[in-house]
Amino acid sequence: MTVFDFVSAVSSGRLNDDFRRIYGNSDMELLRQRARFLDAAEHFSRLYPERQEIHVFSAPGRTEIGGNHTDHQHGHVLAAAVNLDAIAIVSFHDEGVVRLKSQGHKADEIWLDDLSPRDEERGHGGAIIRGVLSKFAGKSVKIGGFDAYTASDVMSGSGLSSSAAFEVLLGTIVDKFYNNGKFGAVEIAKCGQYAENAYFGKASGLMDQTVSAVGGFVGIDFKNPDSPSIQPIDFDFSGSGYSLCIVDTKGSHSDLSDDYSLIPADMRACARCLGADVLSDADEDEFYAKLPEIREKCGDRAVLRAAHFFAETERARLEGEALERGDTEEFFRLVNQSGDSSAFLLQNLYSPKRADDRELMVGILAAKRFLRGGGAVRVHGGGFAGTIQAFVPAYAAKGFAAELDRIFGEGSCRVLSIRPVGGIEISL
C-alpha cells in the first residue's frame, strides 16, 4: 500500500476494527491511536519522501502476572501482552542498508555487509537492530534493507518491557517481508533475546520477547530454557469486568543492581545445597527436610527466597488454569497470594540500602485500601522500586487511577487492557 492509501484508511475509519482488536474498545483510545498512526506516517514521509510503498507493523509490551523471579530458576511464568506497543512505518528496498529513526532518538544506519557487534553501539538502539539482523542473516535469510520510522508508547522503566517490544517489532518486520513469516513467534523472540544479550549487552531471559511475540495470556515453562514450553491461554479479559492497572510509584532504579542479582544468587545457593544448579531441578520436600542445614549454609534470606520460588512457580501454573476455566475469583486469590509471597518471602518491595524509601509498599497499601478486598494487587516486575499491578473492577478504574495519581503524581496510573495478538503487520 502507499502512504496515501494508509492515511486514507486511517482517516476514514477503515482500520477501526483492527485498532479496536489491538487497543481495546474505548472510543477515546481509538481516536488516540488513529492520531498516533497518522503522526507516524507523516514523520515517515518527511524522513523518506522518495518512499511511497509502505508496510505497517506493531508489537506489544508485556506484563508479568505470575511467577515473580521464577524464570531465572527455570520455573513457570504467567504473563500477558498489553495494549501499549511499538509501531513502525517501513519501506523495503535492496540498497543493503537499514535506516531507522525512532521517535525521540537519533537515527541509526546499519549496513548489511558487516553485522558484527560494535562496542560503541552497546546500550543503544543500533545494537538491537544490528543484533536482530545478524541473527536472521545467520539463519541464511537474505535481507535487502529498509527505511523505517518507529514510535513507542511502552514507557521505559515501567516494567512493561519496551526493549522486548522494539526487538519483536524488528523481528516481525524482517520475518514477514524477507522470510515469508517462516520463523514465527518463538524464533522471533529468540532473535530479540540474542540481540539484547550479545549486542546490547544486557542479560535477559526469554519471557519478555516471547509474550510480546505471542500475544494474549501466555503460560511459559522454562524447564528447558533453550526451548521453553509455551501455552497460550484462551481467556477474554475484556469481558471479565476488570481493568489492568499499572502504577508507577516513582522510585529510583539507580544503585539496585546488587539487590536484583542477589535474588538468583540466593536461590542458586539453596539449589546447590540440594545438588542442583537451579531450584526447578531441586526437590521441594528435600528442601524442607534439610532446612536447618540450608539455613546454616545459605542464611535465612536465601531460605525464604527459595521457599517463594517453590510456591510461586506452581502458583503461576494454577493461575493459568484458573483463567482457562474462567474462574476469576480463584485467579485473583492466587495473584494476591503471589503479592504476599513477594513481600514476605522474596523480600523485593524495598532495598535495604534505602530503607526509608518504600514507594512500592505505599502503593500496595493505597491500592488495597481502595479495592477493599476486591480484585488483586501485587508488585510488578523485578521489584525494589518501580511499579505495582492491580486488577480493578472496570467501573472503578477511573476512580482508582485518580486516587493513585493523587498520591504519586499525574499520569502515574495507566489503565490497560490485555492485547490478544503479538507482533503483527497491519494491512488494508
Image (cartoon, rainbow, N blue to C red):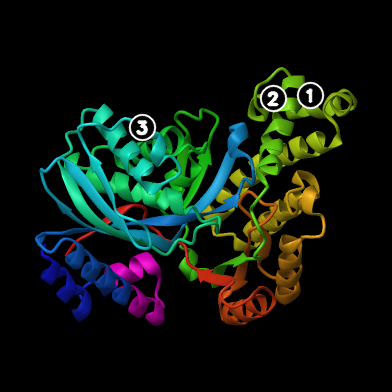
> Is residue 214 rendered magenta in the image?
no
Q: Which residue is mark 1?
A: 286
Look at the image and tell me in which quarter the C terminus lies: bottom left
Q: Which residue is mark 3?
A: 117
* Residue 18 at least partly seen: yes
Reply above or below: 112 against 139. below
Which residue is at the front of the view, 161 or 30? 161
Reply above or below: 16 against 175. below
Label 2 CA crowd tier, 10 Å (few <14, some 14–19, many 20+): some
Q: CA distance from mark 2 to mark 3?
A: 37 Å
- SS class, disc 3: loop
Which quarter of the picture shows residue 326?
bottom right
- Foreground mark, 1 or 3, reads 3
The residue shown at (21%, 36%) is: 112
Reply above or below: 36 against 354. below
* Three-letter code for the amino acid on which mark 3 is drawn: Pro
Bounds of the magenta segment: 17-33
Q: CA distance from mark 2 to mark 1?
A: 8 Å
Q: Position of residue 313 (x, y in %)?
A: 64, 40
- SS class, disc 2: loop
- Foreground mark, 2 or 3, reads 3
Q: Which residue is mark 2?
A: 282
